[in-house]
Image: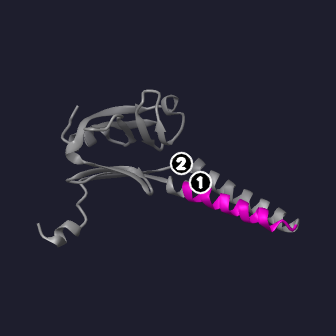
Amino acid sequence: MDETSALEPQATTYRETHTMGPVFGLLMLALLALYVVVTVGAISKHKGSIAIWIGIIAFVILVVMVNFWRLVFEITPTEVVFGFGLVKKRFPRQSVKSCEAYEIKFSNYYGYGIRIGMDKTVAYNTRGGSGVKLAFVGVQRAYVISVDEPAYVCKVLGLEE
């Protein structure tokens, strides 16, 4: 194999993205509004250090929220990749042990994002509803990922139910 082919991006066999709902966007706007109110109040009271600390905390929270805005699930000829922003999991495609449709319920994960469920699975989810449960060789817990067509994902991976 020559060096240039190792550096070329891999063709995507399947790709799906999900974004958080409008409530998530409203939370980001509320955080920004809170920062503006506290900053204006702190500056008017000549407490610049409070404004700086609140600004740093608000910036960190905003970066985390933006990072978790979009979930990506991708299958390439050699890998399965899923995750939010900079927090992604990569597994060799041949290490997929099992694939099955899975119903994601709020009562199992108590929230959205990256969660450990009552059934000991790790979920990467943006909503309740359909998902796929993947188990990998050498990994203790199965992963549940929000996808629209779980049966098709299993078919693409060659692990039809």
Q: What separation in Å lies between label 2 and label 1 (alpha carbons)?
A: 7 Å
**Left or right of residue 86, residue 2 in this image:** left
Decide if residue 90 is in sight here.
Answer: yes
Does the magenta run of residues contain 143? no
> Can you tell which quarter of the image residue 51 is in?
bottom right
Q: Is residue 14 shown above or below 110?
A: below
Identify the residue at horizontal 56%, vertical 59% (top origin): 63
Q: Kindly state the secondary structure of the residue where label 1 is placed.
A: helix
- Amino acid under disc 2: Gly
Q: Is residue 72 shown above or below 155?
A: below
Check the picture and name the quadrant holding the C terminus.
Answer: top left
The residue under label 1 is 25
Residue 89: image x %, image y %? 36, 49
Identify the residue at horizontal 46%, vertical 53% (top origin): 70
Check the picture and name the quadrant holding the N terminus.
Answer: bottom left
- Amino acid under disc 1: Gly
Does the magenta run of residues contain 55? yes
The residue under label 2 is 21
Secondary structure mostly seen in the magenta stretch = helix
Q: Is residue 72 shown above or below 1?
A: above
